[in-house]
Image: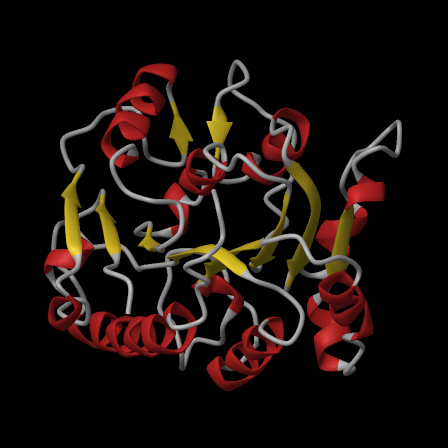
Amino acid sequence: MIQPVLMNFSGVYEEEKFYRKFSGELLSLRTLEGTNCYCTPEAEEQIKAWIEKYPVRGIHFLDSGNYHYVTKFWIDRMQVPFDLLVFDNHTDMQEAAFFGLLSCGSWVRASLEQNPFLRQVCVVGPPRASVEELQDDKGELSKRVTFVTREDLQEGKTEAYRVFLRENNQPLYLSVDKDVLRKEDAATNWDQGEMTLCELLNMTEEIRQFREIAGIDICGEGAAAEGIWNPEEVRINEKTNAILLEKTGCQIDRNVVV
């Protein structure tokens, strides 16, 4: 098992213990300003410096969905053509707001526009309505993105997912936001989908039939209320994180050059 890296922005990983038997590396980022939901250029520079010594080919925990944009910093380091697979209750493809700052809601779009090695993206889990609201005047982004909506999953329409996995053999980076899961399997600080953890694991298990996984990250922790963590929410997330770490981490291909 590859040693996990935990990016501790909120302090949540100090409440969880799932990573300790794997000697997880805990990065203390609690005092870093300009990171919550939106990332300032100054914070981006510091985060990139923090993660520089860790390989992309690994499993990274990113705290809550507020920090999902950190995925972009990991995949910016890829040096070979690759595809991106995202499980998320949101598209994360909104246009940048607030003076163009990178955000947890725009990082997929920004990656498509800026990363020369990123070829195709598949986003699994967002509601169909949120996909239909996306603006893509030139149609260029839509040619490179496959959506499998919440409704598709409910109706068993997942062939588009398998086509995405089968269509080429370049490495795949996997990013999971636990807000795609039902509340019994994750306690996040965002609205959540209805996928079960078992369904998520079954879909990620299919990857190994077609692709090499070059790296993985997982976010979707909860939030403290006035500095106090809900023990039941911590328990739910810790259990799911432990399962995801063991089930997906073993799929990382150590031979992929990134």
Q: Is residue 70 above or below residue 39?
A: below
Q: Nearer the viewer, residue 177 or 132?
A: 177
Q: Nearer the viewer, residue 69 or 89?
A: 69
Q: Quadrant of residue 59?
A: bottom left
Residue at 80%, 77% (x, y): give it. Answer: 157
Whether residue 120 sits left or right of residue 32 in the image: it is right
Residue 188 % position (x, y): 37, 62
Q: Is residue 226 above or below residue 39?
A: below
Q: How many marks?
A: 0
Q: Is residue 128 above or below residue 52?
A: below
Q: Nearer the viewer, residue 189 or 15?
A: 15
Residue 145 % position (x, y): 76, 48
Residue at 30%, 24% (x, y): give it. Answer: 34
Residue at 33%, 44% (x, y): give it. Answer: 55
Residue at 42%, 71% (x, y): give it. Answer: 248
Residue 100 % position (x, y): 55, 17
Residue 109 % position (x, y): 64, 35
Q: Quadrant of the N terminus?
A: bottom left
Q: Residue furthest bottom?
A: 198
